[in-house]
Image (cartoon, helix red, strand yellow):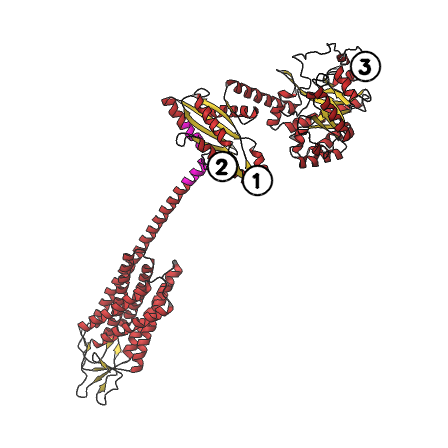
Amino acid sequence: MEWLGLQFFTELPQSGQVILDCTHNPLLVLVAYLVACAASFATLDMAERVGHAEDPASRRLWRWIGATCLAGGIWAMHFIGMLAFQAPIEIHYDLPITLFSLLIALLASWLAMHTLSELRPSLAHYLQTAIVIGLGIAGMHYVGMAAMNSIATAYYQPTLFGLSIAVAIGASFAALWVAGYLREGSGLLHQMLKYTAALILGAGIISMHFTGMAALQLVLPEDRVPTLPAQTGHLQLGLTVALIILLILGSAVSAALADKKLQNKEHDLRRLNTLLGQLDQARVSLQQAANYDALTNLINRRGFNQLFAEKLSQKAADGGMLAVMFLDIDHFKRINDSLGHDAGDALLKVIADHIKGSVRSHEDVVARFGGDEFCILIGLRDREEARNLAQRIMLKMKEPIELAGRRMVMTTSIGISLYPEDGATCEELLKHADLALYQSKAAGRNGLHFYSSNLKSRASYELQLEEELRHALHEENGLTLHYQPIFELKTGRVTKLEALIRWQHPVHGLLTPDRFLNIAENNGLIAELDNWVLRRACRDLGELSRHGCNELKIAWNCSPLNLAREELANEIESALRSAGVAPERLELEVTENALMGNIADTLVLLRQIRALGVSLSIDDFGTGYSSLAYLKRLPLNTLKVDRSFILDIPKSTADMEIVQAIIVMAHTLHLQVVTEGVESLEQYEFLERSGCDFIQGYLLSRPVPLEELRPVLEEINQRKHAPGVNPLSLARGTSAPASPDPSPKSPAPHAGASVVRPIR
């Protein structure tokens, strides 16, 4: 077989001479190996750049640069290897054929870079491409061999010829696989792997070349005699070619490195821009979170204050009015307690929509301050605009709401302050709107109130009283107990006392509970105040026992708020133990409305207190639920009839019948009956005829301090009821007419009769 003058698979001729003493220049062989290694390293670097290039045009550019480096390196290695070949004959090289071999190398290299530019080539794809590339490299080699011109004929040993092709394919497959594997990665270890791979691949490439050279056999015709070749410059030419190709490869690698650094900087810039974008988004999100309520998407207190300051500044410059409205949802806590916080959140969203639907969408500001508290800021021309808006909101709120399978109607309390009438700063206007809201809630809720100057005076007064009450509690200075006798009709003696707190204020004089109990309840002082009354009453009862009053019992009024505290039973036990008083001598009075607040928990607490031996009494019976179903479940001893049923006796037949019915009902439930507010002999006689057990009121005595109590008790216990005796003469030191008008300076018949009297 002959191709381009080369003899493949052809037996050597019978005649002729085989040239045996062919050698290679060791220096040029080493240079050829270095060029092959450099070409391998450049190819691996170009494959990495192709893999990392993001722009398609950049990817194509680096693919062609890589193909040029690989082709130039392989071809230069082959050319230098041919220059290293030394034979005892004259050898010349045909330039066109040599250039044609370079073209073959370029095509094979382009195919290799095209395969490496794919994202994830398969192993089969690698193998197919390696076969084509290996054949191309072998073709480049043997075309280059065909460029040799001499008097000898080139024959090739078939075995070594086939082995050279196999080596070319194997080296191509190894180069493709290693380049694909090393395309991803970074760091020193990655770079060392590239160097090692370049050395191995260079050895593979040059092995193919010299395997092909080993297959070569030059045969001279019989009639020709070997002639010594003339002096040639193969060494200088080989070194020059090596220098040129190494410079080209070095430039390509340097360009790839610079491009890599540039791309890394671009990546860093993109990451920086991404981070800046994320920071900007985070800033917007933080601003949203800082200025807006996450549940209702209304602005929150912080955002409201910023807008408020801007609008206030604008109004101060241009003139005009502003209205600040505080809204509070009435009894919203019951929704959370009964249906859960998820239902409460759903309700707040609906309410927020109701409020937004009632205001002017672009001009008015609606904010949620937290919980069930909303605030509205509106510009207006006159006071009535604010009133009309508040009424629209109240009307909208009364629309039924479907929530958790229930249909409910909510109401709202609203407080309004106006600029510039009620204040010139944000703080003033908000504070004054809050005071107006407090007035709306105190007036029974579901209403609106405008701020007025007396509200501020009242708030200042209450704040001062709160501070002074806190000081009085901590220093135990000014607080005292007064006791009102409770007369037992059966024995004709005083057997009980009701402990009533008074506050000897240094400026305002003696204050009854109606002046300061609300303040204590609203500011978290009621439990401490209640406990002070309990301990002082037990201590005073011990003092009375030491003076012979061993049978007296004391009735102590317990706050409705205190009934929610699990510690109450332990506090009662501790107070009794400290004073050395038997539990049977203490009676706990609670209002029926307080009992109904949380009947299940209240029952548990009352049974614990009853287990101590303390008696239990319902105060103000008839003014609350008055439910027999609850009465029979409660561990009670006594029922106290409210004074409102006694006032018109004997004039009111209906009241007389109600009282008689209450007494019969209580006795049926095995309860004793105390009637308070008794002020006349007729009332006394009616109650005695009706079977009442105890009476309490001004007919006997006003509440008196401990130091005045014993003479009052002795006088009441010794006095006999005789016809014609002035009823009020039963009271110590009095001689008023039978139906007196209470003195304005004296407390009402039952004013302050309970330390925890709820505001109704």
- The reply to whether callout 3 and callout 2 are in contact (CB within 8 Å) is no
Q: Looking at the picture, how far across and down is residue 332, in whole percent?
A: 55, 33
Q: Nearer the viewer, residue 456 or 363?
A: 363
Residue 290: in magenta span: yes
Say what amino acid the circle numbered 2 marks: Val
Lower sequence index among marks 3 and 2: 2
- The residue to which callout 1 is attached is 340
Which image quarter is the N terminus in? bottom left
* The magenta segment: 284-309
Report whether residue 428 is seen. Answer: no
Query: Is the residue marked by circle 1 packed among few (<14), some (14-19), or many (20+) residues within 10 Å?
Result: few
411 lies above or below 16? above
**Quadrant of the rendered structure where residue 365 is?**
top left
Can residue 424 be found in the magenta stretch?
Answer: no
Residue 243 placement, left or right of 305: left
Q: Earlier in the sequence, mark 1 or mark 2?
A: 1
Distance from label 3 to label 1 (Cα)?
60 Å
